[in-house]
């Protein structure tokens, strides 16, 4: 009996130690063992290979190499969105994280992205945000991928921030060839791609729209146009990555 109790206590102790100091915590990107666990679930080598955007376009968040205020896409154009915030350039480890998350069916990769998004949100007046929304996928794309990566991010952010995440936007047009298109072609491709399901619920609201990546900003522009046409007040965007633009 005494031995049995001793074994039970030993097992509880081992489980507790494993719970507090897990023995097999590895980097979500490269699988290297983590000496010290961190909120990003990434090792220091991988963290160093994420290029955090500092100097950026004041409208779309694209990284700028000079000290102008706006990128070529925003300089002379009227944007429908108020501002897009982007964490990192779409290269190195950030690119790999997106690929693993989106195409590798690795939903857990969202946990690497969320801490970066939350840090970026320190630049946003969150009291101003009423609703969080994800850029929706078309039905075809959703079936093919099995999940909407932007929706996973917006739901997790909603929990962290205590701001309601809603599905009031629907993509009625499949825009699968978007990556190979120029800015103008993207714009035309996206025309009438989204509809708002319940306009009463977005009336006069300030909305934060989430996506994993932004390229020319054409998607955010169209989403913001539709939301504002249906009564939304301000539309902000937040993405993990921003592509270096040559698609003007
Ligand atoms: Zn790593
Ligand atoms: Zn811009």
Image (spheres, rainbow, N blue to C red):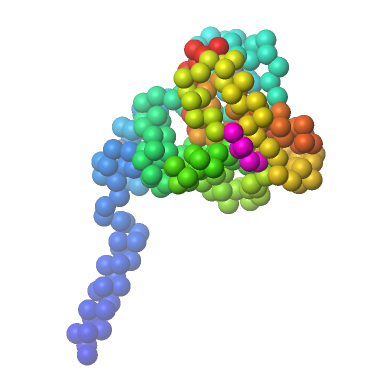
User: Residue 231: percent from the left, percent from the top?
Assistant: 79, 36
Extreme-left residue of the structure: 3
What residue occupies the far bottom of the structure in this picture?
Answer: 1
In the foreground, 109 or 160: 109
Specify the principal SS of the magenta part.
strand
Locate residue 86 relative to residue 41 in the image: left or right: right
- 55 or 169, which is in the foreground? 169
Q: Which residue appears at 22% of the width and 79% of the height?
A: 7
Say which residue appears at 39% left-offset and 38% top-offset.
103
Q: Position of residue 174 (x, y in %)?
A: 55, 33
Q: Which residues are magenta?
A: 169-173
In the rendering, at what x and y percent does residue 155 appear?
56, 48
Compared across the picture, whether 127 is left or right of 65 comes to right
Residue found 30% across the figure and 61% down from its top: 18
Using the image as rendered, state which of residue 224 and residue 9 is in the foreground. Answer: 224
Q: Whole-percent x and y of residue 137?
A: 54, 39
Q: Is residue 170 magenta?
A: yes
* Residue 217 highlighted magenta (yes or no): no
Residue sitting at x 36%, y 41%:
104
Given residues 157 and 144, the one toward you in this image is: 144
Quadrant hosting residue 128 = top right
Query: Height in image: 1 above or below 37?
Result: below
Q: Quadrant of the N terminus?
A: bottom left
Quick one: quadrant of the C terminus? top right
């Amino acid at each position: 009996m005494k031995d049995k109790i001793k074994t039970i206590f030993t097992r509880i102790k081992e489980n507790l130690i494993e719970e507090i100091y897990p023995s097999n915590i590895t980097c979500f990107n490269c699988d290297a063992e983590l000496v010290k666990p961190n909120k990003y679930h990434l090792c220091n080598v991988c963290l160093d290979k994420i290029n955090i955007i500092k100097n950026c376009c004041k409208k779309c968040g694209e990284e700028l190499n000079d000290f102008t205020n706006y990128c070529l896409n925003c300089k002379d154009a009227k944007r429908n969105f108020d501002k897009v915030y982007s964490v990192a350039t779409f290269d190195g480890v950030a690119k790999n994280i997106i690929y693993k998350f989106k195409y590798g069916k690795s939903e857990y990769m969202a946990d690497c992205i969320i801490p970066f998004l939350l840090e970026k949100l320190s630049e946003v007046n969150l009291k101003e945000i009423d609703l969080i929304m994800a850029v929706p996928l078309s039905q075809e794309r959703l079936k093919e991928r099995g999940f909407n990566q932007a929706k996973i991010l917006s739901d997790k952010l909603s929990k962290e921030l205590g701001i309601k995440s809603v599905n009031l936007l629907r993509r009625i047009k499949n825009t699968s060839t978007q990556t190979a298109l120029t800015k103008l072609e993207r714009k035309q491709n996206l025309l009438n791609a989204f509809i708002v399901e319940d306009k009463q619920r977005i009336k006069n609201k300030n909305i934060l729209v989430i996506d994993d990546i932004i390229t020319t900003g054409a998607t955010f522009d169209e989403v913001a146009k539709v939301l504002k046409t249906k009564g939304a007040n301000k539309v902000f965007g937040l993405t993990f990555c921003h592509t270096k633009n040559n698609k003007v």
